[in-house]
Image (cartoon, helix red, strand yellow):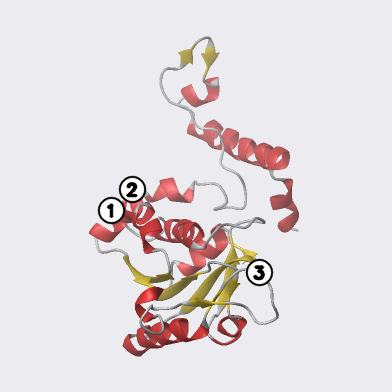
Amino acid sequence: MRIDIITVLPEILNGPLNHSIVKKAIDKKIAEIYIHDLRDYGLGKHKQVDDYPYGGEAGMVIMIEPVYNLISKLKSERNYNLILYTSPDGKPWNQKEANMISTFKNIIILCGHYKGIDHRIRENLIDTEYSIGDFVLSGGELAAAMICDSIVRVLPGAIGNVESALSDSFQDGLLAPPVYTRPAVFNNWKVPDVLLSGNFGKIETWKENQSLNRTKKIRPDLLDNEV
């Protein structure tokens, strides 16, 4: 899978995308991630990528021409399954979306910045907009990094034990059950007896009940979404 990220601050993405599972997936050639500095396509001698908004609002807006030129270049080199934009008013990003997009071959992520982007980009160049929550960040780079991580980690071969990814929260619409490791007793705090029993049938039933109960308590909205 190839992911192209368009940003005005590429240095923010270098850290998150060069460590852990994402880095291993890149090294194993399971994923390719390319970060494109929009300023390389900026206008004039100062490589301008932003300008004042029409209508007199405060803040700066990413211009349409640099974005159009960069996306056009990328599309001339390969076909893309999806061009997405990170935006606080996009549809919520979730595990279902990550699983679905992980089956694609090539995608582009455009990171928002400043006051936003010229709306004509959203109307004519973007396929889908995603939000990672009901809050506003200084830019879309951190959101893009999170989206990349959640996609790459479910690619076949990215994680050594595929069962680990399949048992994550949200894969089945529920929160994951609690997990424990050694020692079995610490500071008089004990691991549940069922996990030490060796009875895998009872353990699976316990995990299912824990997942359901935790979801009811912490994220009942997830159960509402299943209706």
Which quadrant does the C terminus fall into?
A: bottom right
Quadrant of the image occupied by residue 126:
bottom right
53 relative to 114, above or below: below
Q: From this viewpoint, is residue 1 visible?
A: no
Quadrant of the image occupied by residue 10:
bottom left
Quadrant of the image occupied by residue 211:
top right
Q: Residues within 10 Å of mark 2 (few under 14, many from 20)?
A: few
Q: CA distance from mark 2 to mark 1?
A: 6 Å
Earlier-in-chain disc, 2 versus 3 = 2
Which three-letter amino acid code belongs to the residue tagged 2?
Ser
Q: Are marks 2 and 1 in contact (CB under 8 Å)?
A: yes
- Disc 1: which residue: 24
Q: From this viewpoint, is residue 60 visible?
A: yes
Q: Nearer the viewer, mark 2 or mark 3?
A: 3
Earlier-in-chain disc, 3 versus 1 = 1
Which quadrant does the N terminus fall into?
A: bottom left
Q: Residues within 10 Å of mark 1 (few under 14, many from 20)?
A: some
Residue 163, image x, y percentages = 42, 48
Q: Name the foreground residue: 3 vs 174.
A: 3
- Disc 2: which residue: 20
Residue 7, image x, y percentages = 43, 69
Residue name at image x 59 percent, y 71 percent:
116
Query: Which structural element holds mark 2?
Result: helix
45 relative to 201, above or below: below
Which three-letter amino acid code belongs to the residue tagged 3?
Ala
Q: CA distance from mark 2 to mark 3?
A: 39 Å
How many marks on residues?
3
- Disc 3: which residue: 58
